[in-house]
RNA sequence: GCGCCCGUAGCUCAGUGGAUUAGAGCGUCUGCCUUCUAAGCAGAGGGUCGCAGGUUCGAAUCCUGCCGGGCGCGCCA
């Protein structure tokens, strides 16, 4: 609701300034630091003052005096050196916020509405998922929820690199190190914890390869077999990667993360996506065959230099230094090349399509599809053809992502290039203490580092399932300790799960994207302070009030609630400044979900929403301690407190839902 | 060497042009459960916003330089 009023204010100010001063200045608005300064403020008079060469305060006064009434705004004041402070109509805002919260998310998008694609997770299918992968998946999933909430049509993809070196390494391990037959591997793959088996094997293979470099030839051969799809290696790669993908999906199901489509690299190869892309790239001159120099025989893409063109002819342009190899001199395509082809498909720019089959049913019933080389399920939705793409990929891959964007641009698809967004985030690392706790040997040169990198290759990291198990155990212990009466009641298991997942998702979301998360069990296992369970607990408190209220409240209370919503009760009595400021501030915060969702989307920063949920829970807890709701003697005020309480619950539940966190009835 | 990110309270992090005292959580100390769940609340203590210049009516926030840390720059993915 806040955003709607703010938008009206911006529009009115822009219009007014244009009319009155025949000029346009950026109409920026912000939240004043104190509620005594109103709900929306604008420093625009400072900018206007420069243009008109008039004192800002005088301009602000003029505008305040001449501005026409704005719906939802009670008054305008001038403050400081020339701020415009706008004060909301408190009762109107409260009623509108309640009404809006009742409506919920934006309407369903039309089936042919522009599509936003989010690619996330994309874990190599050769080992168990670890904490770093969870950050990716939780960020991507939350961002997708935000996009959907705002009314966009969203398609979530998970890229499966089932023909890459990482899978090849594990296959190599089964073929050479173990060794195991195809049937033995098939049996292993069907057993539980196959991802853990591969986790260890992958580490061993890495060591084995490091011990004797000549073994790298085995790997090259294995990789080639897999890419070309023949022999035991290819069959084994299919078995291993498919089984591991199922492991990953089971893990991510525990966090409530769904996918629409798993796009597999093997199909990009089999269905010749690259060949089609290669032709386009050559035709448009987006890539060149290097005739000489260190890249001789390679097809390279010239990246637009970020330096200015060197002035007045000195300094040879360092030509090939900026070139990125797309096709190697042996004719094979690099990862980036395949990625360009894949992204052409994402935008519907490639005249090829995958075949599709049903792959996995999520616990909520949602169907995840997989690409397929042959079979085609007629029930498959129409995938691809996005107008906007977000790739959730860690910040270390910024460069290859730029190459893909440059590729699209070089092909003449400037609009698509602009619509391809690298949703970049920093990695999860381990604190040295945590690494030691896990029993990893830390080389002395790493010991004084602030954090130790997570490495699937070294087998160094916190496995996702282990962490979730630990959180569940801990959540159960804590719940039984704090509220023994809940133990063993129906739904107890679900509650414990919700608390564990709430703690985990919140932990991963509270950091902004550019922050390296130095993982530590102590922080991640916390249920107090700025955590998911803190927010869940606020909802549980409201639930308690509602339950108790059902037994205590009478018909008059029910009638009063209706009179609150219709505006018959003058809520201004309780919300007027200064005595009513504390209630009013909670109302504003509860009514600010729309603004925070908007900010989280605009900044591509789910952390903004996590913070909002916490702030609202915190504000509610203060309110809860200050006002005893059910025993409030003034019946009209009691109705107001009750309505406000349920508004807070609606918004908290909505915010938690966007964060992928469930709100239990009790905990 | 070039590029990107980071440096804010003992610790972990928000804030990245604007408004007296720069915020939150954790940790420390002091209070508060016979009243709607104490996974909570109230209070105390804790800061040369890495350093030095500059722009501005105004800088943690913008610019330049320096110091310290991380990452990237491959015929790997």
Image (cartoon, helix red, strand yellow):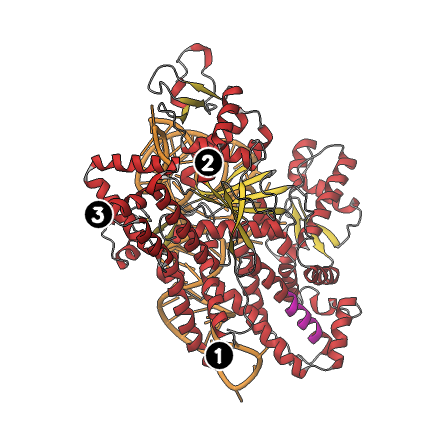
> A52 or A628, which lies in front?
A628
What is the residue that sits farthest to the left in this orientation? A211
Task: Write the residue at 60% across / 52% down.
Answer: A597
The residue indicated by pointer 1 is A486
Secondary structure found at label 1? helix
Q: Position of residue A478 (x, y in %)?
A: 42, 73
Q: Which residue is mark 3?
A: A443
Nearest the viewer among A371 and A40 is: A371
Q: Identify whether A647 is placed above or below A202.
A: below
Foreground mark, 2 or 1, reads: 2
Q: Earlier in the sequence, mark 2 or mark 3?
A: 2
The quadrant of the rendering that contains the N terminus of chain A is bottom right
Q: In the rendered structure, which segment of residues is drawn in magenta?
A: A638-647
Residue A7: x and y, percent?
70, 47
Chain for numbered disc 1:
A
Asked whether residue A91 appears in the rendered view, the answer is yes
Circle nearer the N terminus (1, 3): 3
Q: Are marks 1 and 3 on the same chain?
A: yes
Q: Is residue A134 magenta?
A: no
Residue A270 badge? 2
Q: Nearer the viewer, residue A35 or A422?
A: A422
State whether discs 2 and 1 lie on one chain. yes
Question: Disc 2 to disc 3, how far (Cα)?
Answer: 43 Å
Q: CA distance from mark 1 to mark 3?
A: 47 Å
Specify the principal SS of the magenta part.
helix
Disc 2 and disc 3 in contact, CB within 8 angstroms: no
């Amino acid at each position: 609701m806040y955003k709607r009023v703010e938008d009206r204010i911006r529009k009115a100010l822009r219009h007014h300034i244009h009319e009155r001063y025949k000029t346009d200045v950026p109409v920026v608005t912000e939240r004043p630091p104190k509620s005594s300064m109103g709900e929306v403020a604008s420093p625009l008079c400072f900018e206007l003052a420069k243009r008109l060469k008039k004192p800002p305060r005088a301009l602000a006064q003029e505008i305040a005096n001449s501005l026409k009434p704005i719906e939802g705004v009670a008054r305008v004041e001038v403050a400081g050196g020339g701020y415009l402070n706008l004060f909301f109509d408190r009762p109107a805002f409260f009623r509108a916020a309640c009404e809006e919260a009742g409506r919920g998310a934006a309407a369903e998008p039309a089936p042919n509405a522009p599509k936003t694609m989010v690619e996330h997770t994309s874990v190599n299918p050769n080992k168990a998922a670890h904490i770093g992968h969870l950050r990716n998946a939780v960020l991507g999933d939350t961002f997708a929820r935000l996009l959907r909430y705002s009314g966009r049509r969203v398609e979530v993809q998970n890229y499966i690199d089932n023909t890459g070196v990482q899978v090849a390494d594990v296959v190599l391990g089964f073929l050479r190190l173990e060794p195991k037959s195809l049937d033995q591997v098939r049996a292993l793959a069907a057993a539980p914890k196959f991802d853990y088996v591969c986790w260890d094997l992958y580490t061993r293979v890495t060591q084995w390869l490091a011990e004797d470099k000549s073994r790298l030839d085995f790997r090259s051969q294995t990789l080639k077999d897999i890419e070309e799809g023949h022999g035991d290696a290819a069959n084994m790669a299919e078995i291993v990667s498919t089984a591991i993908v199922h492991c990953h999906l089971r893990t991510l199901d525990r966090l409530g993360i769904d996918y629409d489509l798993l796009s597999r690299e093997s199909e990009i190869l089999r269905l010749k996506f690259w060949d089609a892309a290669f032709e386009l790239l050559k035709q448009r001159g987006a890539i060149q065959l290097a005739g000489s120099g260190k890249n001789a025989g390679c097809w390279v893409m010239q990246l637009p230099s970020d330096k200015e063109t060197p002035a007045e002819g000195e300094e040879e342009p360092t030509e090939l230094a900026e070139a990125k190899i797309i096709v190697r001199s042996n004719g094979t395509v690099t990862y980036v090349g395949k990625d360009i082809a894949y992204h052409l498909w994402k935008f519907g720019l490639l005249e090829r399509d995958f075949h599709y089959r049903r792959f996995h049913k999520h616990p909520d019933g949602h169907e995840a599809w997989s690409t397929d080389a042959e079979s085609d399920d007629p029930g498959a939705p129409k995938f691809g053809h996005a107008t906007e793409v977000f790739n959730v990929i860690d910040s270390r891959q910024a460069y290859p992502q730029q190459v893909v964007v440059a590729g699209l641009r070089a092909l003449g698809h400037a609009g698509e290039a602009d619509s391809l967004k690298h949703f970049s985030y920093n990695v999860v690392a381990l604190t040295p203490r945590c690494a030691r706790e896990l029993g990893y040997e830390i080389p002395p040169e790493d010991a004084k580092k602030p954090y130790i990198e997570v490495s699937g290759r070294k087998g160094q990291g916190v496995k996702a399932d282990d962490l979730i198990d630990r959180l569940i155990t801990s959540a159960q212990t804590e719940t039984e300790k704090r509220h023994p009466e809940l133990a063993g009641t129906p739904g107890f298991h679900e509650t414990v799960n919700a608390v564990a997942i709430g703690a985990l998702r919140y932990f991963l979301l509270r950091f902004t994207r550019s922050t390296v998360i130095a993982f530590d069990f102590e922080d991640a296992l916390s249920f107090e302070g700025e955590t998911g369970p803190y927010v869940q607990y606020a909802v549980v408190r409201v639930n308690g009030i509602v339950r108790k209220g059902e037994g205590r409240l009478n018909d008059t209370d029910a009638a009063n609630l209706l009179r609150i919503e219709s505006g018959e009760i003058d809520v201004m009595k309780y919300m007027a400044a200064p005595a009513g400021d504390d209630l009013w501030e909670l109302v504003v915060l509860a009514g600010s979900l729309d603004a925070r969702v908007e900010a989280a989307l605009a900044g591509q920063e789910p952390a903004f929403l996590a913070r909002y949920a916490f702030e609202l829970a915190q504000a509610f807890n203060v309110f809860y301690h200050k006002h005893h709701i059910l025993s409030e003697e003034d019946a009209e005020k009691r109705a107001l407190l009750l309505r406000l309480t349920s508004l807070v619950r609606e918004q908290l539940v909505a915010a938690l839902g966007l964060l992928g966190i469930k709100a239990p009835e009790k905990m």
